[in-house]
Amino acid sequence: MPPRAANAPPQNDTKVAAHVEGGCHTGAMQRLEGALRELLDESAAFRNDIAADLGKHTFGRQVGFSREGLQLAHDGVRAWVRHSDVTQGCIPTVCAIFDGLRIARRGAALTLIESQDATVLTATGMEALKELSQQVATCISMAQSEVGAVTSLTHAVDTLKASGLEGVGSMVETLESAAKKAVGITHDLKDDSAIAVAGRMRRLEVEVRPLVDAMDPLLSKPWDKVEGEILWETRMVNVGDIVTEVLRDVRAEVSGWAICADV
């Protein structure tokens, strides 16, 4: 995940390290918060005449579904900007952002398909739905550029390369490959890139489980017999932190696809 503003309140050492570089990221997320608020308040797709044309049930099931998604995403962004890790209901902020945006895009896309097939909407209504879909896609791009899978994967690759550690080349290659695939994530009705990234992260998680799991203190060697292994264990913890963070951040964007595709 990219760093937040430098004045973020310290919560733990890892987060403090991630926050100190930032400033522009908070500004970008504030713009995303404003864009989502504007959609919720002013989108023509949520007007009463469209609800009347579609029917109460269809409107609530699809267009209303989009609005609920936008509200969830807005709540997630709002919490992120305020340096909170969770939204109402204890949902992790980045999960709320991408789950909400995916819901919003799905609801708009399904409404467009059904309306085109049944011709239940006027040209004005169709145009409002198309505009909503395009605006949600723009919000997705804004979120991805700040807290998305590509950003997190690239940050992890750069950190591992700069660490000077040996033996992490294969992991770096896996993360680089996932980052290239994640560029194609759209959160449209069908998103093969998101499913592919989810699968790769699931396999990586299995491969690095010994690295990211907490060490059992009962299995540690006595201090007088550790000899030259302290530095290596310290490095392993650092790599474990990096991998744990990138797995968490990428999962926040693609976990919904992982569940749907069972990868």
Image: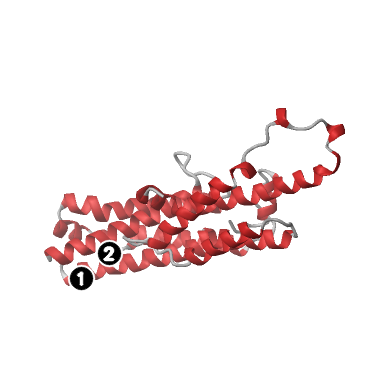
In the image, is residue 64 above or below residue 180?
above
* Residue sitting nearer the eye, 2 or 194: 194
The image position of residue 225, as x and y in percent, is 85, 34
Q: Which mark is residue 103?
A: none
Report the amino acid beneath label 1.
Thr
Does residue 220 appear to the left or right of 91 in the view shown?
right
> Which residue position holds label 2?
44
The quarter holding residue 34 reads bottom left
First-in-chain label (1 vs 2): 2
Q: Could you tell me how far apart the alpha carbons at marks 1 and 2 are, in whole angstroms?
A: 9 Å
Question: Which is more toward the observer, 240 or 127?
Answer: 240
Does 142 sit above or below residue 13? below
What residue is rendered at 70% in x and 45% in y?
237
| Local secondary structure at mark 2 | helix
Q: Residue at x 17, y 49 (%)?
A: 57
Across and down, in percent, residue 185 comes to 43, 63
> Which image quarter holds the N terminus?
bottom right
Residue 78 in view of the camera = no
Residue at 75%, 43% in the rendered image = 233
Camera-nearest residue between 237 and 81: 237
Q: Secondary structure at mark 1?
A: helix
Please tell me which residue lies in front, 231 or 113: 231
Mark 2 Cα-neighbour bin, 10 Å: few <14, some 14–19, many ≥20:
some
Q: Are marks 1 and 2 in contact (CB under 8 Å)?
A: yes
Name the residue tied to disc 1.
124
**Image position of 130 (left or right of 186):** left
Q: Quadrant of residue 213?
A: top right
